[in-house]
Image (tube, rainbow, N blue to C red):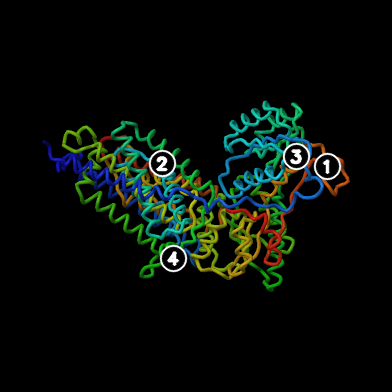
């Protein structure tokens, strides 16, 4: 039997060099945006309060994007993340209205997220439904269930134990930022320093080769979607903490924002290659763009156009580096 | 235990544990409080009369205000022993809503109450009903032509903005603020209703020589309200006043204000939710007022539809018939008068 570690195909060193180049480029874009932000609003842009606001805004979508990065690297796609965030949030706020404590609320959000993710994974790997369709079905049904549970109403959380903790600080840094950092760190280690991570790349690179190398591709795929679902549960906690409420409209368009962040972060939509650092920079780029627009009181429509331009530019950059690499192109 | 057995065991226990924890968390009674009791519906017209079947069609109740519209309509119909209420499932698909209205026409209801998802798209089917001799009460989002309705009842978005603006001007003058920084958290900018609200607001401020400073647009959800307001508060180190167009997104707006620990300004809400009214009554934070765009209009629409079905006029009016158009008033609810308006406050 082949060693699973040898499964990721071809040229890791060369690939890494191009990835580093891309990441440097992305980081450059982020720095340029920060310079623009500072130049236009020197009084407020780089203040501690504004940076904290930006990071807290990035937290929920950042966590969802970590899960999405795993899914896309493994060769899949998850269109249901926004609905799972909504369902997890609504379910936990339903619990909150029944006066259960914060621990039950947190567990509930995590379990609902994980459960939905695993259902996605099982449908895709054991049911052999293509990811696009399986997660589209989850998108619709989780949203429907969230609407049903909430009565389509925004449910305000009055459980102060929960809101006080998650809206508070630890060592002067907001809890939400700690959570984003923790999820990112765990995700990075899992993806880059464990067999699980190597298998994720292998499955996305060439599922058949991975299978021949002895990887249980189906189980692995199911777990990857489970991780994405769990990330949605964590994001739901964050959204509920930020808004002090749960609603079936939470998480709207998260799937698009997360996919956009993952793609501009340099992860190939065809799977097998990608980086969590790139994803994080992608999320931060969108957050900073939004902040610059608001700081300067600019029209939000133009902001969406700017987002579109950034996505296209990033994909063009991706294609250019793929061509330079001379390796498999997508 | 073989690895396969162990795996099955783990999966099995996870599934059972998850199901057990979640099973207790599905009911949501406390969020669905009793429907609003409304101010009207008394007097001679409330005496039972000719039996009337009212058909009702509205968009999906996807946020507090819209949920209250549907709920109020049902509650009002239940108050009349002579009304049979036929409601269709709310939908945001205009095609489906047209189909629902057609079904109600085929059912030969006596009067139709239609809150269209899109007034323009539903105009033709409204006309079809009128042509079939069924009077149509068009609620809120107006049809393109009066040929498509017998009566229109709705709110006044422009006046909402004007009243919010005038209240803020009054507050600024009372506090002797000469050149105030006035923020605005609008709803979805592409909708005419948002544009009208913003225009009314601008016009009212302009009359006092004031203008809108930092402005963001959210999308009527608490999440978008929180995100946009968090950014807005960062952009403005100091604010004197803030108008938020919609109390549903206001939950998020309030969360962002709490997070930023800002207290230096006066905030005015929009629409008239019960939570905002409670905050106004408590008078412990920035919220000092909300301008109504009350879902009680749905209750009125049902009451008027009944009168149309019974060919009665409105009591206290000299007319024999129900008027062709009624615009509800966007009253400013403040600490002084909040008790008077609590009955129309809706749960967001």
Q: Give the residue at mark 2.
A: A80
Secondary structure, mark 1, is loop
The percent position of residue A277, horizontal first and vertical second, equals 31, 52
Q: Give the residue at mark 1.
A: B313
The percent position of residue A128, horizontal first and vertical second, equals 31, 31
**Chain letter for mark 3:** B
Secondary structure, mark 4, is helix
The percent position of residue A204, horizontal first and vertical second, equals 27, 38
Q: Are marks 1 and 3 on the same chain?
A: yes
Q: Are marks 4 and 2 on the same chain?
A: yes
Q: CA distance from mark 1 to mark 4?
A: 55 Å
Between residue B170 and residue B106, name the one nearer to us: B106
The percent position of residue B151, horizontal first and vertical second, equals 76, 39
In contact (CB < 8 Å): disc 2 and disc 1: no
Between residue B285 and residue A39, name the one nearer to us: B285
User: Which mark is nearer the camera, 4 or 2?
Assistant: 4
Q: Give the residue at mark 4.
A: A164
Q: CA distance from mark 4 to mark 2?
A: 29 Å
């Amino acid at each position: 039997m082949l060693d699973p570690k040898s499964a990721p195909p071809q040229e890791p060193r060369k690939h890494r060099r191009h990835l580093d180049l891309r990441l440097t480029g992305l980081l450059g874009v982020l720095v340029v945006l920060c310079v623009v932000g500072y130049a236009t609003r020197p009084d407020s842009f780089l203040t501690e309060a504004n940076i904290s606001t930006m990071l807290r805004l990035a937290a929920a979508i950042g966590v969802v994007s970590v899960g999405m990065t795993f899914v896309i690297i493994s060769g899949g796609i998850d269109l249901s993340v926004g609905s799972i965030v909504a369902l997890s949030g609504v379910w936990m706020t339903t619990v909150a209205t029944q006066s259960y404590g914060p621990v039950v609320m947190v567990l509930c959000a995590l379990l609902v997220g994980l459960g939905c993710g695993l259902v996605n994974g099982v449908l895709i790997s054991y049911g052999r439904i293509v990811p696009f369709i399986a997660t589209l079905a989850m998108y619709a049904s989780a949203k429907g269930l969230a609407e049903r549970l909430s009565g389509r109403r925004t449910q305000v959380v009055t459980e102060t134990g929960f809101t006080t903790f998650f809206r508070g600080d630890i060592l002067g840094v907001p809890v939400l930022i700690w959570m984003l950092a923790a999820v990112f760190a765990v995700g990075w280690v899992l993806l880059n320093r464990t067999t699980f991570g190597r298998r994720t790349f292998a499955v996305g690179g060439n599922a058949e080769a991975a299978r021949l190398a002895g990887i249980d591709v189906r189980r692995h795929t199911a777990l990857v979607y489970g991780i994405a679902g769990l990330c949605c549960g964590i994001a739901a906690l964050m959204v509920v903490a930020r808004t002090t409420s749960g609603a079936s409209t939470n998480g709207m368009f998260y799937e698009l924002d997360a996919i956009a962040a993952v793609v501009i972060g340099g992860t190939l939509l065809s799977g097998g290659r990608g980086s969590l650092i790139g994803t994080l920079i992608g999320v931060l780029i969108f957050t900073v763009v939004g902040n610059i627009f608001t700081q300067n009181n600019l029209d939000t429509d133009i902001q969406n156009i700017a987002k579109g331009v950034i996505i296209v530019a990033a994909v063009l950059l991706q294609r250019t580096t793929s061509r330079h690499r001379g390796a498999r192109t997508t | 235990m073989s690895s396969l057995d162990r795996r099955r065991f783990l999966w099995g226990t996870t599934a059972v544990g998850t199901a057990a924890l979640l099973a207790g968390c599905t009911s949501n009674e406390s969020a669905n409080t009793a429907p609003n009791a409304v101010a009207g519906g008394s007097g001679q017209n409330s005496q039972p009369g000719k039996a009337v079947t009212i058909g009702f069609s509205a968009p999906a109740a996807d946020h507090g205000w819209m949920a209250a519209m549907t709920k109020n309509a049902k509650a009002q119909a239940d108050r009349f022993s002579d009304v049979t209420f036929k409601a269709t499932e709310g939908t945001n698909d205009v095609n489906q809503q047209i189909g629902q209205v057609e079904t109600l026409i085929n059912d030969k209801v006596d009067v139709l109450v239609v809150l269209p998802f899109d007034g323009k798209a539903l105009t033709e089917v409204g006309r079809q009903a009128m042509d079939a001799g069924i009077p149509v009460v068009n609620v809120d989002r107006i049809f393109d032509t009066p040929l498509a309705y017998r009566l229109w009842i709705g709110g006044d978005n422009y006046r909402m903005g004007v009243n919010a603006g005038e209240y803020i001007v009054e507050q600024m003058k009372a506090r002797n603020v000469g050149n105030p920084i006035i923020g605005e958290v609008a709803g979805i900018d592409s909708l005419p209703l948002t544009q009208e609200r913003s225009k009314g607001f601008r016009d009212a401020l302009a009359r006092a020589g004031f203008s809108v400073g930092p402005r963001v647009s959210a999308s009527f959800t608490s999440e978008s309200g929180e995100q946009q307001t968090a950014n807005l508060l960062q952009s403005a180190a100091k604010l004197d006043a803030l108008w938020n167009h919609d109390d549903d997104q206001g939950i998020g707006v309030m969360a962002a204000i709490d997070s930023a620990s800002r207290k230096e300004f006066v905030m005015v809400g929009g629409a008239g939710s019960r939570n905002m009214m409670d905050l106004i009554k408590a008078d412990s934070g920035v919220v000092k007022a909300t301008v109504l765009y009350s879902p009680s209009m749905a209750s009125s629409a049902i009451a008027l539809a009944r009168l149309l079905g019974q060919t009665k006029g409105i009591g206290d009016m000299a007319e024999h018939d129900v008027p062709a158009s009624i615009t509800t008033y966007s009253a400013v609810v403040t600490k002084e008068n909040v008790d008077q308006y609590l009955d129309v406050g809706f749960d967001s």
